[in-house]
Image (spheres, rainbow, N blue to C red):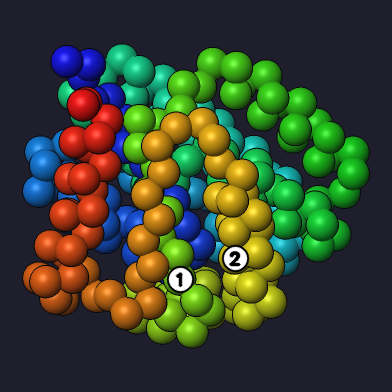
Amino acid sequence: MTQLKHIAICGNIGCGKTSLVEKLSKHYGWTPLYESVDKNPYLRDFYNDMTRWAFHLQIYFLNSRFRQVNEIRTNKKTTIQDRTIYEDAYIFAANLHASGHINERDYQSYLDIFNSMINFVPPPDLLIYLRSDIPKLVRQIQKRGRDFEYAMRLDYLKNLNEYYEKWISSYKLGRLLIINTNDLDFVERIDDFAFIVSRVDLELNSLFT
C-alpha cells in the first residue's frame, strides 16, 4: 500500500482551516503543519497598508510554504498542512495584483520565483477545500479576535472567495474534497466533526483501493 504522505486544507481567511488541521491531526495521528501567522513580520503592517507591504508579505509566505513542502517530503509521517503554496500564488498574489496592491513588475518577479519553485512541489494526496460564505467568514474572524484583521475590507474577502472558486473549479492535481462549512461548527459540535471525518474517510479509502 502506498503511504499517505500529505493532506492539505485550503480556504479563505476565517473558514476554519487551522482548527480543522488541529482536530484532524489529533483524530488520525497526523503531523500538523500550521501557517506562519504569529511569527510573520509583515502581516500587521500589511493590513494597515496593503500596497506598501503586499509584495513583501507574499514573498515571505511563498518562502515559508516552500520550506514546509520540503519538510513534508522529508518527514516519514503523514502531514496535514494549513494552506498550500498554490493559494499563495493563485489566490492571494493574483488578487493583490488585480487590486493594484502589487505592481506588474513585482508580480512578474513573484511569478518567476513561484514557477521555479513549483517544479519541485508534489501536490497533496488529498486537498480539502472549506467553502464558506462571507457572513460566516466575518463571524469567524471576529470570534478569533486578531486585532490587525479588523481593518480587513469585505470586498477583499469577497474577491478572495471568487479567486478560490475559480481555482477550485479547475483543480486537477489530485484528489479534492469540498466541504461547505456555512452550517457546520466542527469545533463546538461533535456531530459536525464526525460528519467531516466520515467524508475524509471515504476519500482516504478511495485513495488506496
In the figure, is residue 191 to the left or right of 147?
left
x, y (%) of residue 78?
21, 28
Q: Residue furthest front?
A: 209
x, y (%) of residue 126?
35, 37
Q: Residue at x 56, y 46 (%)?
A: 87
Q: Which residue is drawn at 56% across and 41% down?
A: 171
Q: Which residue was labeled with disc 2?
A: 161
In the figure, is residue 50 to the left or right of 66?
right
x, y (%) of residue 95?
72, 56
In which quadrant of the rendered image does the N terminus lie? top left
x, y (%) of residue 97?
80, 52
Which residue is nearer to you in this view: 142 or 73? 73
Q: Which residue was labeled with disc 1?
A: 132
Which of the two discs, 2 and 1, labels the residue nearer the N terminus?
A: 1
Q: Which residue lies furthest to the right in this view?
A: 104
Residue 198 falls in image quadrant: bottom left
Circle 1 crowding by C-alpha within 10 Å: few under 14, some 14–19, many from 20: many
Which residue is nearer to you in this view: 17 or 125? 125
Q: In this view, does 107 lie above or below 46?
A: above
**What is the secondary structure assignment of the residue under circle 2?**
helix
Q: Is residue 29 above or below residue 73?
A: below
Q: Which residue is drawn at 22% across and 59% down?
A: 196
**What is the secondary structure assignment of the residue under circle 1?**
loop
Could you tell me if residue 163 is visible in this image? yes
CB atoms of marks 2 and 1 within 8 Å:
yes
Q: What residue type is labelled 1?
A: Ser
Which residue is nearer to you in this view: 72 or 207? 207
Circle 2 crowding by C-alpha within 10 Å: few under 14, some 14–19, many from 20: many
Q: Which amino acid does label 2 sit on?
A: Asn
Q: Is residue 157 above or below residue 83?
A: below
